[in-house]
Amino acid sequence: MRLSVVIPTHRDTPKARARLLWASSWASDAVEVVIRDNSGSAAKRAWLSEIGQANCNIVSVDPCPAYTNFNAALALAKGDFVLFHGDDDAAFDRGIAAFAVAADATADDASVAGLTGAYALEERQRSHLVSYAGVDSADVLQRVDGFVGYQGPNLMFYSAVRRTVAEAAFGFMERHPFQMPFRDNVFTLIYLLAGRFPSINRLAFIYDNANWDSVEQATANDLRYYAAAGLDPAIHKLHWLLCGFEGASVAMRSRFALPLAPAQRQAVAARWFELMFRRFVGSVRQGPALAAPAQMIVDRLLGSYPNFQLETLLGGICDYMALFSAEHAQAYGRFWREVAAEAGL
């Protein structure tokens, strides 16, 4: 099996059921469909049990955290490449078939970490097509530039990724003490460090971004993620700085950086951090004014650019977290220092 379409599902709505039924139709000798439902709905479980389709693996479980459902669904996949699919999104039949063909053609090419295509992006006021330039390059910096250069939602996450690469990334992020709302960006960086992403040269995925395409909605969604992670809402002030630090740390001081030359690691980390820092400085999603001690730390972090040092940034981030929870600050600092120690970087 070359391609697994992996669908962790929780919603029990007519739309979600329609999307799941549509996705089940892709199952074939070339495509495995994995559906893992954690809704706890007896009615949905009974409905799913009636989908009888070869190479369509459907599992219903008790309610569990969304990230647990993602991990467990990935563990069920058998394909060389895995493509995550939301139960509120859709994909093109011929796009899925093209992914399967490309997966078969590139399965033995170690330079290929994944496959991508063109995306139809739906927003409240418009629809448009998105594709990523440069992600098929042998040059890792060009791949990262192609990803971060697009100012919009992370559609690269919905690429077909080599299963071993996805498993390594999910295993790494599972150890993270907090599931951050920007974690899909860090996942994608890990994927791009692993290799190039040829395009299937056709429309692949339909992504509905209507729940994220305003400042107010994006902020509310971020705050829900931070609350679920047990973090004080004041952490939102550092949202893009945290994303910049975590991506730069992955590129400079994690095992995913080991295949890269030192100059490549430095270039990728600098490019990633530069863009995320600009978002941090210019963000209007940072929330209300902070108390003086917190604002002093934010000002210190702002002053670290452009000559940032990862350990200095980590210290500032942990100092900020400690204002609200010493335990959270210790856990965050310990994780990233262990990542660097394990890589020997």
Image (cartoon, grey):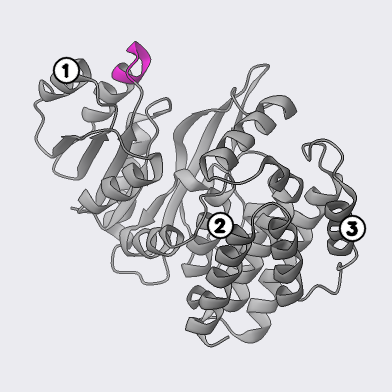
N-terminal of the pair, mark 1 or mark 3, is: 1
The earlier-in-sequence mark between 1 and 2 is: 1
Q: Position of residue 32 (x, y in %)?
A: 20, 43
Is residue 86 shown above or below 69?
A: above
Q: Nearer the viewer, residue 315 or 131?
A: 315
Marker disc for residue 321: none
Q: Which residue is mark 1?
A: 47
The boundaries of the magenta stretch are 12-17
Q: Is residue 15 magenta?
A: yes
Amino acid type, callout 2: Val
Q: What whole-number distance in Å separates the C-alpha atoms at marks 3 and 2? A: 27 Å
Q: Is residue 298 above or below residue 69?
A: below
At 69% from the left and 57% from the top, the residue drawn is 321
Where is residue 73 shown, x and y percent of the image?
A: 27, 45
Q: Nearer the viewer, residue 98 or 22?
A: 22
Task: Give the residue at x 35% y 69%.
Answer: 109
Instruction: Please name the residue that numbered disc 2 is placed on.
Output: 186
Instruction: Using a 10 Å C-alpha cutoff, classify the residue at mark 2 as few (fewer than 14 neighbours), some (14 to 19) or many (20 or more).
Output: many
Q: Is 273 colored magenta in this rendering?
A: no
Q: Which residue bears the numbered disc 3?
A: 296
Amino acid at dot 1: Trp
Instruction: Say if residue 138 shows up in the picture.
Output: no
Circles 1 and 2: CB distance less than 8 Å?
no
Amino acid type of the residue that numbered disc 3 sits on in the rendered structure: Met
Place of residue 280 in the rendered image (x, y in percent of width and height, measured from the top left): 79, 50
